[in-house]
Image (spheres, grey):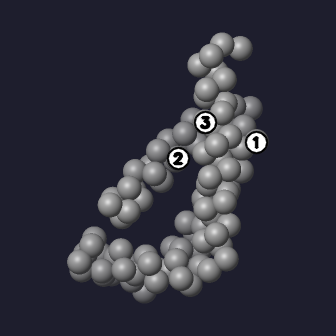
């Protein structure tokens, strides 16, 4: 095992744990997360007010997706079945929420 593989495995485990912890924290209060999504969908941020009625459903979906993605990364499911979508989903997830944080 070379240095690049070791760094990749450490990053995979770190990001998987990060996704699981973040998802479990959001899972503790999905209604609060839906309020935050409503703020994001408002006219001042993303101007997607048609999504405000679906904020709770989207919050639940995002939380479940985040935890499942974290578990997939942590157990290395993408390496066993050669699933490329796990890496792409992580990138898209980070990229989408990067707009909202800054």
* Image disc number at residue 22: none
- Left or right of 46 on screen, residue 29: right
Provide the secondary structure element on which disc 1 rests.
helix
How far apart are labels 3 and 2 at the CA level?
A: 12 Å
Residue position for label 1: 75
Viewer-closest of 67 and 84: 67
Residue located 64% across and 43% down the image:
14
Residue 44 appearing in the image? yes
Q: Quadrant of the C terminus?
A: bottom left
Instruction: Point out residue 80 in the picture as x, y percentages from the top left corner.
Output: 74, 32
How far apart are labels 2 and 1 at the CA level?
A: 15 Å
Give whichever of discs 3 and 2 has the lower sequence position: 3
* Image disc number at residue 11: 3
Instruction: Point out residue 78 in the picture as x, y percentages from the top left corner.
Output: 67, 37
- Left or right of 82 on screen, residue 88: left
Give whichever of discs 1 and 3 has the lower sequence position: 3
- Above or below residue 96? Residue 29 is below
- Above or below residue 43? Residue 46 is above
Residue position for label 2: 90
Q: Are marks 2 and 1 in contact (CB under 8 Å)?
A: no
Choose mark 1 or mark 3, whichever is in front.
3
Instruction: Point out residue 82 in the picture as x, y percentages from the top left corner.
Output: 66, 31
Q: Quadrant of residue 87?
A: top right
Viewer-closest of 5 and 82: 5
Q: Quadrant of residue 6?
A: top right
């Amino acid at each position: 095992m070379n240095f690049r593989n070791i760094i990749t495995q450490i990053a995979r485990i770190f990001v998987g744990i990060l996704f699981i912890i973040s998802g479990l924290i959001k899972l503790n209060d999905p209604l609060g997360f839906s309020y935050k999504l409503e703020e994001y969908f408002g006219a001042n941020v993303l101007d997607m007010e048609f999504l405000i009625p679906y904020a709770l459903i989207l919050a639940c979906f995002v939380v479940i997706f985040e935890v499942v993605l974290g578990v997939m990364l942590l157990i290395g499911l993408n390496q066993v079945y050669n699933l490329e979508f796990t890496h792409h989903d992580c990138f898209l997830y980070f990229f989408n929420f990067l707009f909202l944080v800054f």
